[in-house]
Amino acid sequence: MGYRIAVVGATGNVGREMLNILAERQFPVDEIAVLASRRSMGSEVSFGDKTLKTKDLDTFDFTGWDMALFAVGSEATKKYAPAAAKAGCVVIDNSSLYRYDPEVPLIVPEVNPEAVHGYSKKNIIANPNCSTAQMVVALKPLHDRATIKRVVVSTYQAVSGAGKEGADELWDQTKSIYNPTSDVPPNKFTKQIAFNVIPHIDVFMEDGSTKEEWKMVVETKKIVDPKIKVTATCVRVPVFVGHCESINIETEDHLDEDEARDILREAPGIMVIDKREDGGYVTPIEAAGDFATFISRIRQDSTIDNGLNMWCVSDNLRKGAALNAVQIAELLGREVLKKG
């Protein structure tokens, strides 16, 4: 016996990726509904070897459905998620709307699977920010061993994190540079993204940080440990898929780089590719389309007593969004609903 699953926002990048991953991982589906806004109603999307037509989210009745994977913005989620939850359908939400609600669990299954039991307070589970998700997968096994005190992270985030518009803008600007008769001014981003990097993701806050940076701080504390101090600088780079992070950690107990490498090799969801030679590390090109979070460049930080540096890469549309949502659905089914 399987589940009745709804994918909300099925025509977007993340929604389509959710459908791909549900099929790839052979999630036990009895029935699936693909939902979108009225203007996209009737659009076709793929689910394994099937082609499905989207239904109107505005008129959809969630009664009798087990789970709904939401891949729409906060405004649409605010309107439709409570209705789905009230109808008895567990919402797994990819927006930022519920991440900081103390009554809604924020889950990365490799890190805090026990939090899934808190779903019943609102019938909603939140998916973390894409940059947070891959980082906490790397932090958790090291924290369990040596207790992380402080994290300094700089991100290099792909344009697909800004949706289809971000990817289109990079593509169009790149073409325009080689065609002097065309000009594509910044629209989705604040400056030209082609052949450039932009140290600005989301809106600025009063302390000078951006909201993306604030998300990484707050979400890491909620998912891993409220005592961890985190400071982040988030940068948009001209890469289509794959977020990268340079992570510096300070631990309470000494952790040798070789032991850290061994711990990460054994940790769920992680692939260590760390050879001290040309090409002995992972870049976004290799990570795109993969489920794993890749760790490279593990080395001691000699400027502090207990410090480590590492390089973390993951497909942001997968682990950063769609894969994590599907993993939450698998966890919910395995630990709570127990139908599949």
Image (spheres, grey):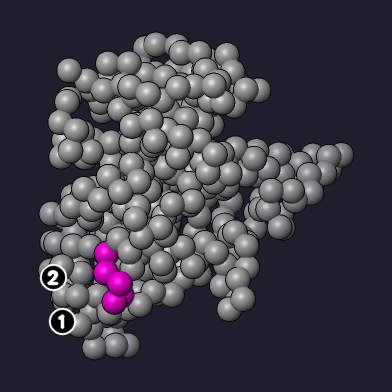
Please tell me whether residue 63 is drawn above or below residue 262 in the rendered image.
above
Pointer 1 residue: 253
Please tell me whether residue 160 is drawn above or below residue 259 in the rendered image.
above
Residue at 13% over, 70% down: 145
Q: Is residue 240 visible?
A: no
Q: Is residue 147 visible?
A: yes
Q: Earlier in the sequence, mark 2 or mark 1?
A: 2
Marks 2 and 1, how far apart at CA: 8 Å
Helix, strand or loop status at disc 2: helix
Looking at the picture, tell me which residue is in the foreground, 81 or 272.
Answer: 81
Q: Is residue 225 magenta?
A: yes
Helix, strand or loop status at disc 1: loop
Residue at 56% over, 72% down: 209
Q: Is residue 337 magenta?
A: no
Q: Position of residue 162 (x, y in %)?
A: 57, 47
SS assignment for the magenta stretch, majority: loop
Pointer 2 residue: 145
Please tell me whether residue 3 is drawn above or below residue 291 in the rendered image.
above
- Circles 2, 1 touching at the beta carbon (< 8 Å): yes
Q: Is residue 88 left or right of residue 305?
A: right
Magenta stretch bounds: 224-228
